[in-house]
Image (cartoon, rainbow, N blue to C red):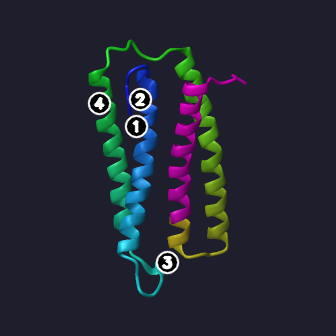
Amino acid sequence: MESEGMSVEEQRTWAYGICAVFGLLGYLAMLLARRSPEGIAETAYVAPMSIAIAGSVIAGIVANIVIGMRSDDAGTDVRDDQLYRQGEYAGHWVLVAGAIGALILAVREVDWFWISQTIYLAFVGSAIVSSVVRIAGYRRGFAPW
């Protein structure tokens, strides 16, 4: 991630997206390594999910501290605020879709494993979509609605 020419907020957006992706990949690696012979739904997932979530949050905090220490930027501007808002709106819809999916699974009394996975993927998907939309706005511009 080359910081030359990137605003602090763009660097933070990259860090947020990267932490989300690596958190998901780490979780999948831990989950598959522990896969139960009875099937994936029987796999102990709480500890790997907790580790992935905590790891992503801690990595994000450390990344933001490092980015802040390396920066002499004065802060956000109107464009940063608009891009942030636009990214959050896009990510919000992924989160809503995941919540609806988890609700449907709960109503159908599907195993907790699948409900948990749906909720986790909704949060990760929201972070990734939000980051992609914001980065696209930084790189290609955007049309405020």
Q: Is 28 situated above or below 7? A: below
**Residue position marked by numbered label 4 in the rendering:** 65
**Residue position marked by numbered label 3 in the rendering:** 41
User: Contact (CB < 8 A) between labels 1 and 3?
Assistant: no
> What residue sits 29% from the left and 30% below the top?
65
In magenta, the rendered stretch is: 117-145
Q: Residues within 10 Å of mark 3 (few under 14, many from 20)?
A: some
Q: Position of residue 90 (x, y in %)?
A: 63, 39
Q: Is 11 situated above or below 43? A: above
Residue 12 or 51: which is nearer the viewer? 12
Residue 82 or 133: which is nearer the viewer? 133
**Residue position marked by numbered label 2 in the rendering:** 11
Estimate the spatial distance between the alpha carbons at disc 2 and disc 1, rounded to whole Å: 6 Å
Q: Position of residue 105 (x, y in %)?
A: 63, 69
User: Contact (CB < 8 A) between labels 2 and 1?
Assistant: yes
Give the mark toward the camera: 2 or 4. Answer: 2
**Residue position marked by numbered label 1 in the rendering:** 15
Q: Which amino acid type is shown beneath numbered disc 2?
A: Gln
Estimate the spatial distance between the alpha carbons at disc 3 and disc 2, rounded to whole Å: 37 Å
